[in-house]
Amino acid sequence: MYKLLLVDDERLILEGISQVVDWEKAGTELAGTARNGIEALEKIEALAPDIVISDISMPGLDGLGLVERCSQKFPAIKFIMLTGYKDFDYACTAMQHGVKHYLLKPCNEQQIHEALIELVQELDERKSREQFVMEMKHRLTKVLPHVKEQFLKEWISNKTYGSHDLDYYQELFDTRLDDKNVRLILLHLEGSFEYEHLFALQNIAKDMLSEVLLSTTIGSHVLILLEQPDDGRQQSDLLERIAEVKKIFHNFYKIHVTIAVSDQGRMIHSRTLYRQTLQCLNHRFYLEEGSLITASDIPADELSGKNEMDLEEEQICLFIKAGDQNAVEAELERLFGVLSEQRFDINVTRSYVLQLYSAMIRLCIPEERGTFTSGLAELAELGNLSSLKAFVKKEAGRLTQMYDRHFVTRQSSIVDKMLRIIEEDYCNSELSLSSVAAEMLYMNPDYLGKIFKKVTGEKFSNYVTHYRINKASEHIIRSGDVKVFELAELYGFGGNAQYFSQVFKKVTGRTPTDFMKPQVNGTGE
């Protein structure tokens, strides 16, 4: 129902219209009346009506003055103007303030009803548009973090991205990037780890580093784009806080993190800064695990990186650990395609393949490592690129299958923990995928949701709903007659009896009241 205020200085007209019009039938409710424009403004302040029916000619503040003031202070209000024949020119003036509806006095209830029906339809359409816009904004808000992550990944790796793309995303994100000094931080997990560790590390870094503009995961790395303020803040302060990120993550997961920090530069030069962080990470061979490496730690000739190929073996290692056979094969095709195009010296090409195979060996579980290591001798004897490719693809496929079996087991253990949380906390109306993710130490809700559906075949929210309704059904069977609002309170619906009843019927096919009846009359009918 839309609230309506009726304004007229003639008492008989005011009372007559109030009584004869079927306001409810027109989709409205008469919230109040006023005898002039000044009184009407006070009522509008107090009642916040959606519609005002007002006479034009009134003492003090007339209808036109009322419309003019409301168009500035309450622009959403819709007006229907009542006018005598002599005031018709004034009605035209009212239209300049957005008034589209007017009735020539004397008018009957049918004319008022028809005008209201038309106006209510306009308000319904406006409300529908506003709801649509709100839903779109809500959806955008939900996907925006993913868009930001994908943009940073594409910006760093896609050389076709230029200033026009940056302008577009700056407008989308409602932030300026091109005029900022930035640094890139690349975080690398040492040893064996799972997908969720990357998400955890990313979240800890965003919590600890207030200057974060964008962040994403690239292969087995977490990439952070930081704003470098022009306020003279020392780099040492930043390095101390980055070191704290390493410490916190290690305390949670007992996994070391090696971190590379670029020099500062403009956003347009961030690809160069990214290559710098990769070169810093390559230097970790000479340092201890969990080091913090900056460009100043690297010899100048090593930073230049001329005539080198970035094999990106960590990307394929990530696909292997994910048990994704198709992605592994596609990545190997790409890598060997690059080697074929480069036409390096044969020994150089072979060294790259050995580098790739060595990275695969490091992924092996200890009891399988000896078998894969023995393959190095066979690999060294192969005489052409196609045979090297076939051998590596075969071994990569075998290793991927091992990880696939491990990955399924790992996913099942994660879902088992989620199920235990549901069992313990299903009565809490605040239980959600996000709250479960927080309870499992910085895990990513989207990632958890995908794992949950893959293992159980059901969305997390659906599972929780069915679990709650099943528990409520058991309660009814045990207790017999019970208040619906009590069930809603007990089983995680926050006391919302109406919503609980709707969900209960959707799941069981019966309302809670109908479900209780067999317990009362002793029949199953």
Image (spheres, rainbow, N blue to C red):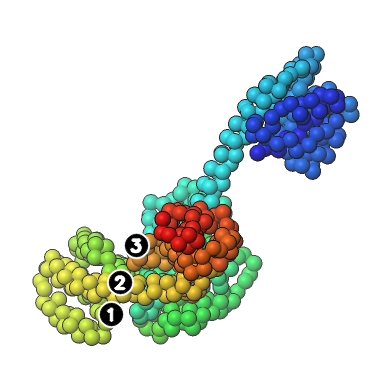
Residue pictured at 81% horizontal, 39% vertical: 43
Marks 2 and 1 sit apart, C-alpha to C-alpha, by 21 Å
The residue nearer to you, when weighing 94 against 260, is 94
Q: Tag 2, which secondary structure? A: helix
Q: Single out the mark in the foreground, 3 or 1.
A: 3
List the residue tagged with mark 1.
362
List the residue tagged with mark 2.
408
Q: Give the amino acid at mark 1.
A: Arg
Q: Single out the mark in the foreground, 2 or 1.
A: 2
Farthest residue toward the top?
86
Q: Tag 1, which secondary structure? A: helix
Instruction: Look at the numbered discs 2 and 1 and tell me whether their residues touch, using CB distance below 8 Å.
Output: no
284 sits left or right of 115 in the view: left
List the residue tagged with mark 3.
457
Q: Is residue 246 visible?
A: no
Residue pictured at 56% horizontal, 67% vertical: 490
Q: Tag 3, which secondary structure? A: loop
Q: Give the amino acid at mark 3.
A: Gly
Query: Mark 2 or 3 closer to N-term?
Result: 2
Instruction: Quarter of the image for the C terminus: give it.
Output: bottom left
The residue nearer to you, when weighing 485 against 420, is 485
Instruction: Quarter of the image for the N terminus: give it.
Output: top right
Up/down of 55 relative to 307, above or below: above
- Percent of width and height locating residue 362: 28, 80
Residue 297 occupies quadrant: bottom left
- Percent of width and height locating residue 403: 27, 74
